[in-house]
Image (spheres, rainbow, N blue to C red):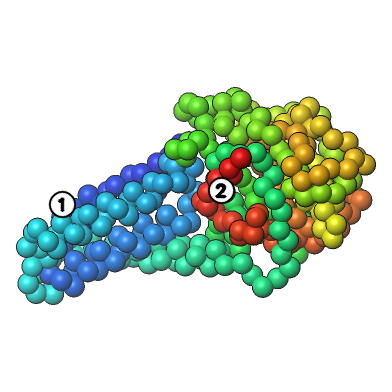
Amino acid sequence: MSWMVMVTQVLLPLALLAWMAFYPAAGWLAWGVQLISVTAVLLGIGLAALWAVPPFWVPYAYGFVLLLIVATHLLLKPTPGPGLWRASTASSIAIIMAALLGSFGGYLGWHAAKGRMLPEEAVVDIAPPFPPGHYLIAHGGSTPMINVHLKTLNPTVERFRPWRGQSKALDIFRITPLGLHKNGWKPTDPARYTTFGVPVLSPCSGEVPLVVDGIEDMPVPKMDRDHMAGNYVAINCGDFFVILAHLRQGSITVAAGARVKTGDILGQMGNSGNSSEPHLHVHAQRGLPEKAPLAGMPLWLTIDNRFLVRNDTLHVVP
């Protein structure tokens, strides 16, 4: 867990909840501003941040605790008491600062919420490219706030052009039922991540036009920017191609020209290429340019007709 995650996803939420619980503002207006500000911060962080460590259910726990605090104040205590604003000077300053922070939380939450809407553009649907289990969407959605891939849509940046096809991609972790995805505190060995070694399945029936293998899996968090996609397989699904990237070195079981059916094993999830930790990258595109295979036209992607965005969980049953 990085210091930024520790501050924004643990220390800040706990501090705000403790403030609400033990130092409620006096006066209905002051208390209302305090409550709205804290709610906006928790909602913004909950929607925009990646909840892998801490796991995906923690924001819901924060929300539940906040509801308990509010119910306790309203039912069991005389706070916020009569009047609109009876907060002390120090408390008033804290409320104003929280309101500013809440405005930023609202900004995060708005853009993250917008990213949950599927644009009215070309969409293709695939089967889950992995076996039964629990999965977390790390990057996905229709705004850059929750999907970092979208930055490569910018046509003015020349270095993005060879990777334009991956602009609407998903990054996916394998997780345990409790939402955990690694064994240990910031392990560097990719094999200690739940995702590493999980089979990758063909998400459609079609032909394999391109396979790249032989690129080593990197220790976490080192990344190989010379081979951005790492080891990957391209599947021609008919009128679109699906790319499955960052696969484990030597795990790919198909060759160019092979025919595959939905559910056939293609390889294993790994940590090759521009990958900060083991995950599966999957995207759809039209065309497979010879000189820049990932420069095709990007397509929005659904899995089993679900538009998946950051922090969504996907539970695949046998």
Q: Where is residue 311 in the image (x, y as percent from the top left)?
A: 51, 51
Residue sitting at 88 percent across and 36 percent down?
Answer: 255
Name the quadrant containing residue 36. bottom left
Q: Nearer the viewer, residue 294 or 61?
A: 61
Occupied quadrant, residue 125: bottom right
237 and 107: which one is in front?
237
Q: Where is residue 171 in the image (x, y as percent from the top left)?
A: 63, 47
What residue lies at 55% left-to-right and 41% top-to-bottom?
134
Q: Nearer the viewer, mark 1 or mark 2?
A: 2
Q: Decide if residue 182 is on the left or right side of residue 44.
A: right
Q: Which amino acid does label 1 sit on?
A: Phe
On residue 22, the disc is 1
| Residue in view at x 77 percent, y 50 percent | 204
Image side of residue 227 versus residue 41, left or right = right
- Where residue 80 sits: x, y (%)? 12, 65
Measured along the vertical axis of the image, is residue 117 above or below residue 219?
below
Q: In this view, does 267 lie to the left or right of 288?
A: left
Q: Of residues 139 and 91, which is closer to you in this image?
A: 139
Please tell me whether mark 2 sits on a helix, a strand or a loop. Answer: strand
Classify 276 as above or below 167: above
> What label does residue 300 carry, if any?
none
Q: How crowded is mark 2: few (under 14 residues within 10 Å), some or many (20 or more)?
A: some
Q: Position of residue 300 (x, y in %)?
A: 69, 62
Amino acid type assigned to the residue bearing label 2 in the image: Leu
**Mark 2 sits on what residue?**
314
- Residue at horizontal 19 percent and vertical 66 percent from the top: 31
Can the viewer see residue 52 in this picture?
yes
